[in-house]
Amino acid sequence: MANRRTVIAGNWKMFKTTGEATDYAVRFLEEVKEVTDLDIILCAPFTALYTLKNELEESIVHLGAQNMAWADQGAYTGEISAQMLLDVACTYVILGHSERREMFGETDEEIAKKVRQALATGLTPIVCCGENLNLREEGKAVERVQGQVTRALEGLSTEELSKIIVAYEPIWAIGTGKTASSKDAQEMCASIRATLKVLMGLAAEKVPILYGGSVKAENIAELMTEPDVDGALVGGASLDPLSFAKLILNAVPSSVSVEEGI
Ligand code: PEP
């Protein structure tokens, strides 16, 4: 993991009004103000982004969205463009989350277009991949995940690929309380890095690969010991500012441990 950024990103999904986002930001910033060794990202709903832009200004916390359109602008009712995200100080965007793939029918082709759009506009895409339980039980998890990564990223230059973050999120572990073992997470993150190497050569060593799926303050430290796990994408456990801050402190090797609290 040496030489790679450690990234902890919270995915609020469809939770929090603007008032709740403001309260969260105030309490969260107080807890993480001393953190220096990792990148913290809050991926909020579109409606909370402007509020958070103001709250997080000049803080160490970066702002991200959870989706965006592949087009620049135009007659795309209900969509949000990359420019609109940049306008509210977003620097990251989650793309291809399994909830968007499964519930909203997002295809690999659309995700690939969104990744290109994000890179072209200067947003950092957090590209999600992950298998469902059937595929894992059939022994086809690696094939599925490597395929998703390849289809999202093939054709991009090494320079472009150096700007992305990949998040491995097994669908069976999202919101279920079931975390992949740190060994399973490592195996898949290593196979994602092998796929990246095919696309971009040794520069793949610099791409942060995150694990996501029921990550909590109690299991982050163990996941972080794995060489190819460079951080986490966190859903449920990012919704409470104190719990998420505790998770972040437990991800930083030199910080207080979960037993000691914060
Ligand atoms: C997610 O939605 O990206 C996620 C990992 O959720 P949870 O942490 O709740 O499993």
Image: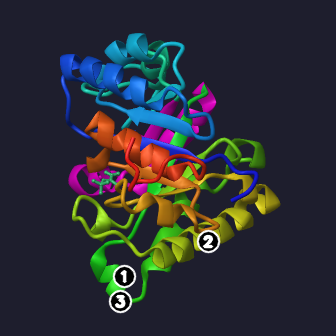
User: In the image, residue 156 lies at what x, y percent?
Assistant: 68, 48
Q: Label 3 neighbourhood size at 10 Å, few (<14), some (14-19), many (20+)?
A: few
- The front one of 195 and 155 is 195
Q: Amino acid at mark 2?
A: Ala
User: In the image, residue 169 lies at what x, y percent?
Assistant: 40, 61
Question: Would you place residue 238 above or below residue 79 in this image?
Answer: below
State which tag comes first along the sequence, 2 or 3.
Answer: 3
Give the residue at mark 1: 136
Say whether mark 3 is within 8 Å of ligand 1: no
Q: Amino acid at mark 1?
A: Arg
Mark 2–mark 1 CB contact (< 8 Å): no
Residue drawn where x is 41% and y is 33% of the image: 42
Q: How far apart are the two marked residues, 2 and 3, measured between alpha carbons?
A: 20 Å
Say whether mark 1 is within 8 Å of ligand 1: no
Main SS category, magenta section: helix
Mark 3–mark 1 CB contact (< 8 Å): yes
Q: Quadrant of the C terminus?
A: top left
Give the residue at mark 3: 138
Element assignment for label 2: helix
Question: Would you place residue 149 above or below residue 40 in this image?
Answer: below
Residue at the extreme top of the image, as rendered: 54
Give the residue at mark 2: 190
User: In the image, residue 53 lies at what x, y percent?
Assistant: 42, 15
Q: Magenta residues?
A: 92-121
Mark in the foreground, 2 or 3: 2
Residue 194, numbered label? none
- The front one of 90 and 34 is 34
State which tag comes first along the sequence, 2 or 1.
Answer: 1
Residue drawn where x is 63% and y is 40% of the image: 37
